[in-house]
Image: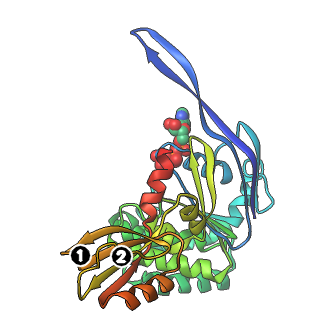
Amino acid sequence: MIRTDNLTRNFTVRIKRGRFRREKRTVEAVAGVSLDIGAGEMVGYIGPNGAGKSTTLKMLTGVLTPSSGEARVCGLRPVPERTKLALRIGVVFGQRSQLWWDLPLHESFALLRHIYRVPAGEHAARLRRCRELLDLDDFLDTPVRQLSLGQRMRGELTAALLHGPRVLFLDEPTIGLDVVSKQAVRSFLAELGASGDVTLVLTTHDLADIERLCERLVVIDHGRVVHDGTIEALHARYGSRRSLVADLSSPLPEGFELPGATLVGVEADRHRVTFALDGVTAGAAVAQLVAAVPIRDLSVVEPDIEDVVARLYTT
Ligand SMILES: Nc1ncnc2c1ncn2[C@@H]1O[C@H](COP(=O)(O)OP(=O)(O)OP(=O)(O)O)[C@@H](O)[C@H]1O
C-alpha cells in the first residue's frame, strides 16, 4: 500500500556567519528511507524533534517533492498523481485544519462530500458511523472556530474519512488533547484499524498512542530509519526487561537467588523485592518464588516504552 525506496529530501538553509556573511548549508531532512507498508497495517512513525517525520509524510501525501528516491502510495506517485491520490488518502495534521472555520461542522462535512463527489448514501453511512463512535452530535451545529481542540480533532478525523480513503496519515493526532478526548480518539482509531479497511500511519510524541494502536514501529533519527519492527522487537533489541515485584509476608532470606532473574530492588526491611526477568518467564519466576517464600501480593511490570525509546534516541 505504501512503498518507498531510498526516499530522500534535502533542504538548503542559509546560516548567518558574522554580520554580513551567510553560508549555505544542506540539511538532509530525510536521508534514504525505504519502507514497505501493507494494506491494513497500523504503523507508528516516531523520532525526536527534527528527525524527518513530517517531511516524510509531506512526501507521501504529495505536498513535497523528494530530492531523490521513489515513493508509491496506493500504487500512485504522490506528487505527479496528487489529485488521484487525494481521493484515496485521508490526512490529519494536528496543526492544520481541513474544516471551514466559520461554518458549522456539519456544513464542512457537506462541502467535503461535494468536493470529493461522494455518493450521498456512502457519505451518510460514514458520517453516521463517525457520529456514533466520536460522539459528534452535541457540536455538529457549532462553528468550527468555537470548538474545543478535542471536538475539532474529532471533526478532523471525520472529515478525513468521509470519502472512504484506503490510507490515513495522522501527524500528532492527540497533541494537546485532554485525557478523555485522547481516549476517544485512540479508541476510534483502534476500531478503525481493527476493521482492516484502512492503512494507518501515525506520527506522535505520545508513546501511549503507539502502545495502544500500533503493532509496528518505525523509528527515524537524523533522517534515517533506526528501527523497523514490533514493539516487542524493540524491547528485545534494547534489552528491556519485565520485572516481578513481590510483597512478602516474611523478609527475603539473605543470599536468596531466583534462577533466570536478577534481584534489582529490596525495600521495606526485605519485605518488598523486585526481580528483573532476564531468562525466565513470569509464570516460572512466580512459581519459584511462591515455593520459597510466603507472598502477600505480586505484580509483573512491563518495561516502559518511554525508557526504551529515550535510549534509542540517545544511542
Ligand atoms: N522547509 C524547510 N526548510 C528548511 N529546513 C527544513 C524545512 N522543513 C524541515 N526542515 C528541517 O528538516 C529536518 C526535519 O524536519 P521535520 O519537520 O521533518 O522533523 P520532524 O521529525 O517532523 O520533527 P518534529 O517532531 O519537531 O515535528 C529538521 O532539521 C528541520 O529543521
Q: Position of residue 69 (x, y in %)?
A: 76, 42
Q: Quadrant of residue 120?
A: bottom right
How many other residues sit within 10 Å of disc 2, few (<14), some (14-19) or many (≥20)? few
Q: Earlier in the sequence, mark 2 or mark 1?
A: 2
Residue type highlighted by circle 1: Arg
In the image, which disc is placed on residue 270?
1
- Is label 2's Cβ within 8 Å of ligand 1? no
Residue 78 image position (x, y, % from top left): 73, 52
Quadrant location, the N terminus: bottom right
Q: Residue at x 63, y 49 (%)?
A: 225
Give neighbour class at mark 1: few <14, some 14-19, many 20+ (Cα, 10 Å).
some
Q: How many marks?
A: 2
User: x, y (%) of residue 196?
Assistant: 67, 79
Disc marking residue 38? none
Classify residue 152 by image quadrant: bottom left
Q: Vertically, is 80 above or below 306? A: above
Residue type at mark 2? Phe
Q: Is residue 67 left or right of residue 170?
A: right
Callout 1: helix, strand or loop?
loop
Instruction: Relative to 22, say whether 165 is above or below.
Output: below
Instruction: Name the residue beneath numbered marker 2.
Output: 256
| The image quarter in which residue 40 lies | bottom right
The CA distance from mark 2 to mark 1 is 11 Å
Evaluate whether residue 147 shows in this view: no
Q: Is residue 1 depicted above or below 80 in this figure?
A: below
Q: Residue at x 66, y 74 (%)?
A: 198
The local secondary structure at tag 2 comes to: loop
